[in-house]
Amino acid sequence: MRLRRDQAPGDAVPAPTQSPQRSNVRPEIQALRAVAVLTVVIYHVWPEAMPGGFVGVDVFFVISGFLITAHLVREVDRTGTVSLWQFWARRARRLLPAALLTLFVCAAATIAVVPQLYWQQFLTEIGTSTAYLQNWQLASEAVDYLGAENRASPVQHFWSLSAEEQFYVFWPLLILVAAWTARRRLAITIVLLTVTGLSLWYSISETASNPAAAYFVTPTRAWEFGAGGLLALVGARAALPDRARALLSWAGLAAVGYAAAAYGTDTAFPGWAAAVPVVGALAVIHAGMPAARWAPSAILRISPAQFLGDISYSVYLWHWPLLVFTPFVFASPGLTETRIAVPLLTVLLAWATKVLVEDPVRRSAWLSAQPRMTFACSAAATAVVAAVLVGGTSHVEAQIHRAEREQVRLVAHHPDCFGAAARDPKNPCDNKDLRTKVVPLPVAARSEQNAPCPNFRKDSGVRVCDFGVTPAQARKTVALLGDSHASHWRAPLDVVARERGWHGTSVARTSCVFSKATKLTPEPTKSQCLAWVKNVPGFFRKHPDIDTVFIVAITGGRVTVPRGQTMLDAKMHGVRRAWQSLPDTVKHIVIIRDTPRITRSTVECIDRAIAAEKRAGLTCAVPRETALDEDPAAVAARKEHSPRVQVIDLSDVFCSNRLCYPVIGGALVFKDLHHFTRVFAETLGPPLGRKLAALSRTWVRVP
């Protein structure tokens, strides 16, 4: 899946700033926090109502940059330096109590109500969130083809809190270094301008070339903090007339509202697009609370806005875990009920957390007077969360190791009707001992690798590796070509290759279909795939001994559709042109029809069926019409009526006329939503060999 754009609410600390009316809490900032957290919550609870609600995080980043910079600069003006330990201790007292409480509850709830299938992912993400490194983990998963299918964890929203914490570490260091110079204000301004400018440039560049990762990483977001910081440095000196401030405040609110309503998950973000909510937030902050009769000040000052702004940090912390855990607690939660209950419970929990946890710790005179005790208490609370994580992770790992040992024993005994053999069209069979068996367990299968492919190397601009027998032993050399679905077919094809004395070369690239149609994927994958498709024919020209190529590709995804064509037409035309680009030395192109796919609910069903000792394959079967997409390559090959391009279809091994089975003959078919487990893939060798034998009998007639 594509990871959702989940946001966090910036620094929630009221701080005095240089303004015409100096106070400890600025009403316009409290109201701006309320607007920001409201857009985020609506986006998560009711995304179609506010598809760009993720811009709330940008507003929070601006607020944080403004307040923290104002505080640090005042300290520099007063003392000539920055007390780092005092600053970090204040941040810890303000942010850690509520955050660690949320993380502890999420860890405990994961163990209590979530299937063990997700424990490793959830507990790992809770761990990275505790260390405030969640944004970097999500950035790596965002560009990882398999990781992108992870279920949203209860702490996915901690990515922006992680970015903020990293800001709190480095920002005061930069200001401290600048404060050592003779002209402190000028030096601080130059430093902030430089960092902000470089970050903005990097954000625009990285959003264009690698948007999946750019969304999460701190360098692409630092300019938003910097923009708020620069306003804190120079904004108060540029006083505006009251009417101009009123107009500025309305314009700022309109900019944030426009971005929240008009943007969507297809918006290239952050990049230039983030400038709209950032400038909007800056405008509202700089305008303050203008006294003009038509100014928005009366609206910003109303009690609900001030109350929501005051608890915005805890609202953000609690709303996402409640949304994630609801389906695990209630089997089929109603959409309307969820949209009502979750926000109400979020506000109640946020208020309780603010009153009982945040305020007492933040206002503690004892902790304020002893920064060391602040760090000691923070470390102790963090250790409690870590202990829960270690316990849960150790339990899952023990379960996996136990299941792996059982799997080895089972496979070593070569039971009858195991895996694909249970659905052999010629000799169907049923082994009663395997009816409730599932190997590997879904939790163990998630991290399973495809069949080994040694000797990875670069050749003619493509990465290749070997399977089958060695070149010295081989009677024939074949190639397997395609995306990650080609890689998961390597295991059964390896069985066939070894039986026939073939040497195989795997020419596969994740997320890249061998097609001249341009697949609509994010950069840099898009450009890399286009280059890969262009280089593939050169590889085969360099290796004329490869006369047979097996091609597999995922059926899903979108491509650029020329005018007058359907999506299917565009895909079929694209694969035909790709086949035609292969040299004449490739005499046989065998399209292996893509396999069924399942859903997350299917995987969870298997987990429950195992626990209840039910027949997971039957209990969790998926309708054939849902599981099997139309395969453009297979359709195109059949329409070609060419002896050079032929199709192998093993759908009947996976599916009956009505249903497709996620567990067959005791073997778990899928390790995720559409990739085989290696255990099941190897049992596909015999049926694949028979199909290939029937096909190859026609090859002698090819000119």
Image: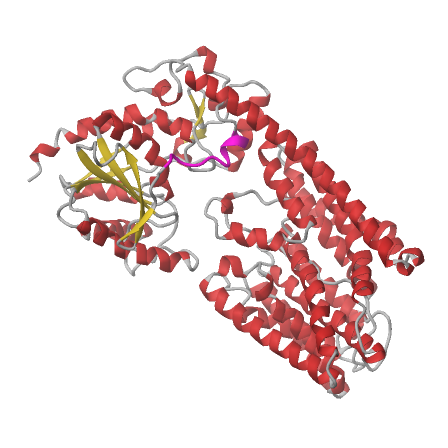
Chosen colour scheme: secondary structure
Q: Is residue 508 on the magenta stretch? A: no
Q: Which residues are magenta?
A: 442-452
Q: Answer above or below: position of 90 versus 338.
A: below
Q: Nearer the viewer, residue 510 or 701?
A: 510
Name the residue at 46% across, 66% down: 208
Provide residue 54's location: percent of width, then percent of height: 61, 59
Provide residue 504's location: percent of width, then percent of height: 26, 37
Q: Is residue 165 visible?
A: yes
Name the residue at 64% across, 43% down: 324
Q: Is residue 382 left or right of residue 471?
A: right
Provide residue 542's location: percent of width, then percent of height: 19, 51
Q: Is residue 659 visible?
A: no
Q: Answer above or below: position of 81 versus 212.
A: below
Name the residue at 67% across, 39% down: 326
Question: Which residue is at the far front?
Answer: 472
Q: Answer above or below: position of 16 versus 689.
A: below
